Image (cartoon, rainbow, N blue to C red):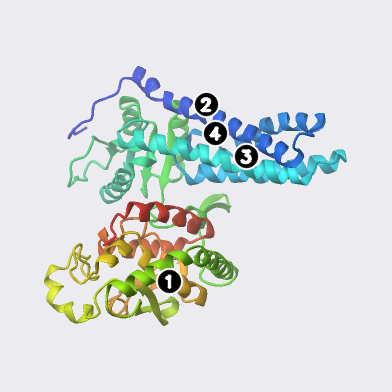
């Protein structure tokens, strides 16, 4: 064992003290789900029956909260490995809502009892929304604590040098996920090029010794070809006896969970990687969603568009709208619309400002661009200048959510792999919008665009739209 920046070893008695957050989180989740069910049932009773509530529905209203907790438990909503992870917790709530609705329908049919559909259609969705809000509050609280180094799962990473380095970096970049690497197991001949928490040998006995010594909660195997099959199975048995979780990283990056599944084939558990959705029904559904929601948003922001247009027209010389050629899905070019936020001769003056570029190397950006008008600064700060792109969405040239719409000059510099970002329509917002906007490097921006193109879904679109509102209000990276 070669120590290097060895972390403080937590005594075993303290480990159980630290693990109390799991029990507290579970009780808080139970209390939140119960409160959500009571709120949903109460609103449904009042909304459906008013003051004329019969005894039967009072009894049903008392049973539903208990049934709701059972459905959430069956949907794995109280498993500690999902605490604070966000998406999986929310999926468990949605699955529980679907399961409760089905259970009520089946029970009503089997007992030939008449249950008012209006009551069920009010109670279950309201319960689901309230429970998701409660989980969101819990997720926020535990995220703050994890950024302070609390409520973390202690991880021992096993693998070769490069794989261990990659896995450690990914875990350390996301402290909100709740993993902290306290030790690594490498082949004794491998040298680490950077400081590490603690380096051990890599035999099964070394791994188990490290687990016991550092009170490890999770052992993460990082795509190690020498630790597979029966060896990995024996290790899982030994860790199971110690109450330690085993996770295996297949080494596949930037692929979302819904595209990955484990299926038994010929007595083996094989990892299947589904192809990304690039055509057919999902894209038709996305197109319908874009046009419907885009049309509603255009109606909602019409007053803002009118005021912004008048301010642009009255405060500077030139057209109200700025049209710029961008590249869409499949390489098709289209005129993207924006409110004009710069002086009329902005493009002519760009050459004299190139040396001051603060963008990501390929995109030209300046925090204090002298070509931006006074009104334009406010429009850019709150992304109001981009609202006319809702017209592009209605035309089918853009999507509400997607990769950043590139310029033809950018596309000309794409590598072969980079062109995959054009498998989907560019978006009014996207992962790039909620992850730093202009503060991202070119490589980071491209990585986010490729991640979206490979893993998009309606659920991801809704999450990005929600986060966009927060990013716009915060105006981070907008200049």
Q: Nearer the viewer's eye, disc 3 or disc 4?
A: 3
Q: Secondary structure at mark 4?
A: loop
Residue 144, x across and y down, in percent? 35, 36
Q: Nearer the viewer's eye, disc 4 or disc 1?
A: 1
Write down the quadrant of residue 190 in the picture. Answer: top left
Which quarter shows the N terminus?
top left
Residue 145, x across and y down, in percent? 35, 33
Q: Is 466 situated left or right of 310 in this image?
A: right
Residue of label 4: 78
Residue of label 3: 127
Whether pointer 2 and pointer 1 mark residues with C-beta atoms closer than 8 Å, the reply is no
Residues under labels 3 and 4: Cα distance? 17 Å
Whether 168 is drawn above or below 73: the answer is below
Residues under labels 1 and 3: Cα distance? 36 Å
Q: Is 15 situated left or right of 136 in this image?
A: left
Q: Nearer the viewer's eye, disc 4 or disc 2?
A: 2
Residue of label 2: 27
Residues under labels 2 and 1: Cα distance? 46 Å
Q: Nearer the viewer's eye, disc 3 or disc 2?
A: 3
């Amino acid at each position: 064992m070669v120590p290097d920046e060895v972390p403080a070893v937590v005594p075993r008695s303290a480990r159980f003290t630290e693990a109390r957050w799991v029990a507290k989180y579970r009780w808080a989740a139970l209390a939140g789900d119960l409160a959500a069910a009571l709120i949903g049932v109460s609103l449904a009773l009042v909304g459906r029956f008013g003051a004329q509530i019969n005894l039967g529905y009072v009894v049903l209203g008392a049973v539903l909260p208990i049934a709701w907790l059972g459905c959430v438990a069956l949907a794995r909503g109280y498993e500690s490995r999902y605490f604070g992870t966000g998406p999986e917790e929310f999926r468990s709530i949605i699955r529980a809502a679907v399961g409760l609705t089905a259970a009520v329908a089946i029970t009503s049919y089997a007992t030939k009892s008449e249950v008012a559909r209006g009551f069920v259609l009010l109670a279950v969705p309201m319960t689901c929304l309230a429970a998701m809000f409660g989980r969101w509050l819990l997720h926020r609280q535990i995220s703050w604590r994890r950024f302070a180094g609390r409520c973390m799962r202690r991880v021992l990473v096993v693998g070769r040098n490069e794989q261990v380095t990659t896995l450690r970096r990914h875990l350390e970049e996301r402290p909100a996920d709740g993993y902290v690497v306290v030790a690594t197991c490498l082949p004794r001949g491998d040298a680490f090029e950077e400081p590490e928490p603690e380096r051990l040998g890599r035999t099964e006995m070394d791994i188990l010794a490290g687990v016991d010594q550092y009170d490890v909660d999770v052992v993460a195997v990082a795509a190690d070809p020498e630790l597979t099959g029966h060896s990995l199975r024996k290790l899982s048995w030994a860790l199971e006896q110690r109450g330690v979780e085993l996770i295996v990283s297949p080494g596949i990056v930037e692929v979302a969970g819904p595209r990955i599944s484990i299926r038994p084939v010929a007595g083996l558990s094989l990892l299947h990687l589904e192809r990304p959705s690039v055509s057919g029904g999902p894209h038709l559904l996305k197109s319908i969603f874009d046009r419907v929601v885009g049309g509603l948003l255009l109606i909602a922001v019409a007053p803002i568009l009118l005021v912004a247009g008048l301010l642009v027209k009255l405060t500077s010389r030139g057209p109200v709208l700025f049209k710029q050629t961008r590249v869409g899905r499949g390489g098709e070019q289209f005129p993207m619309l924006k409110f004009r936020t710069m002086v009329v001769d902005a493009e002519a003056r760009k050459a004299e400002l190139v040396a001051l570029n603060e963008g990501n190397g390929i995109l030209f950006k300046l925090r204090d661009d002298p070509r931006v008008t006074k009104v334009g600064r406010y429009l850019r700060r709150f992304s109001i200048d981009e609202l006319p792109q809702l017209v592009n969405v209605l035309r089918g040239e853009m999507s509400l959510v997607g990769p950043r719409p590139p310029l033809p000059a950018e596309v000309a510099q794409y590598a072969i792999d980079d062109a995959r970002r054009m498998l989907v329509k560019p978006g009014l917002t996207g992962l790039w919008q909620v992850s730093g906007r202009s503060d991202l490097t070119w490589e980071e921006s491209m990585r986010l665009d490729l991640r979206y193109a490979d893993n998009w879904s309606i659920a991801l679109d809704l999450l990005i739209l929600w986060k966009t509102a927060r990013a716009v209000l915060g105006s981070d990276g907008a200049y």
